[in-house]
Structure formats: structure tokens, C-alpha cells
Amino acid sequence: MASPSSRYDLTGRTALVTGAGGLLGRQHVAALAEAGARVVVTDVGLAQAETAVASLKQAEPSSDLMALEINVTSLDSVRTAHERLAGRGVTVDILVNNAAIDPKVTSAPGVMHSSRFEAFPVPQWQTEIAVGLTGPMLCAQVFGGEMARRGRGVVLNIASDLGVIAPDQRLYRQPNVSREEEQPVKPVTYSVIKHGLIGLTKYLATYWADHGVRVNAISPGGVFNNQDPAFVERLTRLIPMGRMAEVDEYRAAVQFLCSDASSYMTGQNLVMDGGRSVW
């Protein structure tokens, strides 16, 4: 029987992370590299991927990282990335669907706020759905499909606590805005996309269950990143642990879900939100 620590060992495996240039994307890359994996660091532009690699290499020079451009909304782009990796003899064992657009809530008093559902622009809906939901589907088609043909692999979808609960719009209210239709809100797209991503997780987990491919999701809570103190105070009141997450607190969970430590787990959504969704 393997020791508990060896089950987390990803030596000899290759992971691919989409949207790896972002705040949590870099943490996912670091977690996988720390466990011994070679990591393909991808973003919508090669420059973003290369910048992430350079930053991560500075922190951990021994990391085995490779920058690659992928536009997850384009099947041609995903297929081209797959072909480039195959041409280098690289086979993806772990896919982390992280790419997403997280619309920030800002206030612009005086006009009906475009973040509100009644005024939400259809092109913005389509763009965010394309990145956050269609993108994971396309990447799973190409990279997960290959895993299924080989009979082994792991897909991890990065969801959110807002894929489990609805946004609490009280967090975003501005005291100096008197008209309700001008109050900023968390847009409809993010929560809908993350709920859908958890649904995709369950679908693929059962679809590929007899092909050796495990598919799970993780739903992180908010990460502290020097947000407005008033917002942080309002949010932490909703969290039983009384604080937001530190940026590196999800690393061990990613290692667990992408390794043999979770070998009997598929179709699940691991919620790490400081207890927010319990209240």
C-alpha cells in the first residue's frame, strides 16, 4: 500500500492549467509543480503565460513549467495547443479548467447600472459564458477526450462559492446611491457560469467513469487581495471563520484533487469558503 504522502506525488505527470496568469491560476500552477508535476501554463496570450512562468520560476527555479497560448473559447485554438504539445511529445494527464472572467463591481451613479439584470448587455453575457463555461467544455473535449482514450486522467474545474449560493447583493450597495436601479450588483453571469461548471463536472464524471477519468470541482471562497476595507468588513461578517482566504490556502486542496490521494472521488464539488455557504 502506498504511503499517504506518496499518493500526492505527481512526478512523471503533466498538468495543463488554463487562465494561469491570474491570481489563483498561478497558485494552482505552483501547487501542481510543488507536487512534482510538469505544468503547461496557458493563457489567452503567450505574453501573459510567459510572464506567469517567469514569476513562478523566480519563486521556485526548479519548477518544470512550459508557457503556451490557448484561447479557450476557440476549438481551433484548443486543438492547435493539443497538437503543439503532441509534437513535443507532451501528453496531458491533468486538466485544470481555471480560465474565467470575474466581473468586478463598480459604481457609476447617474445612469441605470449596466451590472443590473434588467440592463445586462447580451454581448457581455455571451463573452463571459464563452470563457467560463464553453471554454471548459472545449478543453475537456480535447484534453479530457484524449485521457478517456488512454484510460486515465483527471479534470479539475475551478468553480466558486457563488456556484453553490447566490451573490449577496448587499455586499455591493453604495450608501451614496439613492436610486435602486443605479445600485451596482454582482452580475448574473458569474454565479450562473459557476453553477453550470459544477453541473458539467457531474456530467463528465459519470460520462467518463468507466474510462478512468475522474472529474471534480473546487469552490473557493473570496481571496483577500487588498479589496476595499468596507467590502472586506461586510463580507467577513458572512463568513463563520471571520476572514477571507489567503491566496495560497487552496494549494493543498488542488494537490489532493489532482492526485491519487482522491482516487475514489469523482463528480464532487469541494467547497472551501470558510463556512460561508453553511449559514
Image: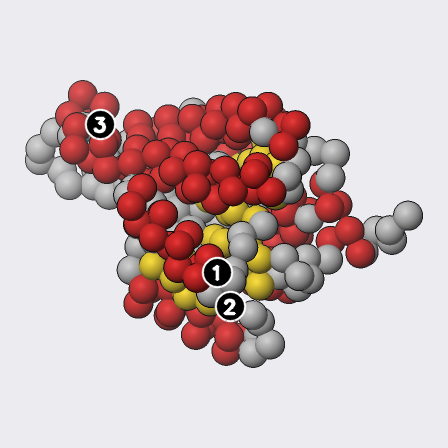
The type of residue carrying mark 3 is Arg
Of 269 and 167, the residue lying toward us: 269
Asked whether the residues under the numbered discs 2 and 1 touch, taking CB atoms below 8 Å apart as contact, a structural biologist would say yes
Q: Nearer the viewer, mark 1 or mark 3?
A: 1
Q: Is residue 101 visible?
A: no
Q: Is residue 2 visible?
A: yes
User: How far separated are the C-alphas under marks 1 and 3?
Assistant: 37 Å
Q: Earlier in the sequence, mark 2 or mark 1?
A: 1
Tag 1's secondary structure?
strand
Asked whether the residues under the numbered discs 2 and 3 touch, taking CB atoms below 8 Å apart as contact, a structural biologist would say no
In terms of image quadrants, where is residue 20? bottom left
User: How far separated are the C-alphas under marks 2 and 1?
Assistant: 6 Å
Mark 2, Cα crowd under 10 Å, few <14 / some 14-19 / many 20+, is many
The type of residue carrying mark 2 is Leu
Where is residue 78 drawn, in percent x and y? 36, 47
The type of residue carrying mark 1 is Val
Mark 3, Cα crowd under 10 Å, few <14 / some 14-19 / many 20+, is some
Residue beneath disc 1: 40
**Residue lying furthest top:** 118
